[in-house]
Image (tube, grey):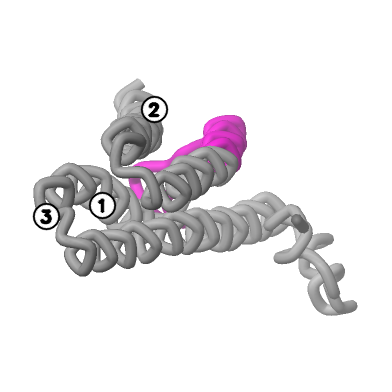
């Protein structure tokens, strides 16, 4: 996967390089590129979790068709966690405040958030594995409750990890 920061900075033209040379502008311009990279990364994170939410929704439809109605609500607990995570990631403010805003997140804090978001992206793979496990268990009704429990647990950990990201932003802004 290409680093989102590289994606934002690839293909810089002569004008972009010249702007970097203007005194005082370089820091702002770099922050803006990082802000764009942060947005790109968060969109990717949200997309990955939304893919899993779509899969969970399809499993629920299968369960209804298979008359496994008693388990649909249990799967809904995971679906709610994933949907909440997607909505929070998509609705999150960009990585830091703009140039003239009163509240700012400095470069180190932004880098920390960037790394946090990469870890969230990686945890989407664990959610996908849990969904894979539930799909595989659908053929054996004895295994389905265990697979559901695992999915709810993994989805909950991902949502809590995102909530900790928000706490980091708030604590940095209060300091």
> Would residue 105 be counted in the magenta stretch?
yes
Q: Does the residue at mark 1 contact the one at mark 3 (Cβ under 8 Å)? A: no
Q: Secondary structure at mark 1?
A: helix
Identify the residue at horizontal 32%, vertical 28% (top origin).
167
Q: What quarter of the picture does the N terminus occupy?
A: bottom right
Query: Which residue corresponds to mark 2?
Result: 168
> What secondary structure is marked by label 2?
helix
Residue 9 numbered tag? none
Tell me the mark number nearer the camera, choosing from 1 and 3: 3
Residue 112 percent location from the top left of the image = 57, 32
Q: For residue 94, which quarter of the picture? A: bottom left
Of circles 1 and 2, the one toward us is 1
Give the extent of the magenta segment.
Answer: 96-120
Q: Residue at x 53, y 32 (%)?
A: 109
Relative to residue 59, is residue 172 depicted above or below?
above
Query: Could you say where residue 158 lies in the image, as x and y percent from the top left?
Result: 39, 36
Q: Which mark is residue 79?
A: 1
Picture coordinates of residue 69, whole percent (x, y): 11, 55
First reached walking from the N terminus: tag 3 or tag 2: 3
């Amino acid at each position: 996967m290409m680093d989102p920061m590289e994606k934002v900075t690839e293909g810089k033209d002569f004008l972009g390089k010249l702007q970097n040379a203007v005194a005082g502008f370089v820091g702002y311009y770099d922050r803006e590129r990082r802000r764009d990279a942060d947005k790109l990364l968060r969109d990717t994170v949200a997309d990955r979790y939304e893919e899993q939410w779509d899969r969970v929704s399809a499993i629920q439809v299968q369960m209804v068709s298979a008359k496994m109605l008693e388990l649909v609500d249990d799967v809904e607990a995971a679906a709610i966690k994933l949907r909440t995570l997607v909505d929070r990631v998509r609705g999150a403010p960009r990585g830091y405040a703009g140039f003239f805003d009163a509240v700012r997140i400095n470069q180190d804090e932004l880098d920390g958030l960037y790394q946090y978001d990469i870890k969230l992206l990686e945890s989407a793979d664990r959610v996908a594995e849990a969904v894979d496990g539930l799909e595989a268990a659908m053929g054996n009704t004895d295994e389905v409750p265990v697979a559901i429990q695992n999915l709810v647990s993994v989805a909950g950990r991902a949502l809590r990890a995102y909530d900790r990201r928000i706490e980091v932003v708030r604590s940095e802004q209060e300091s």
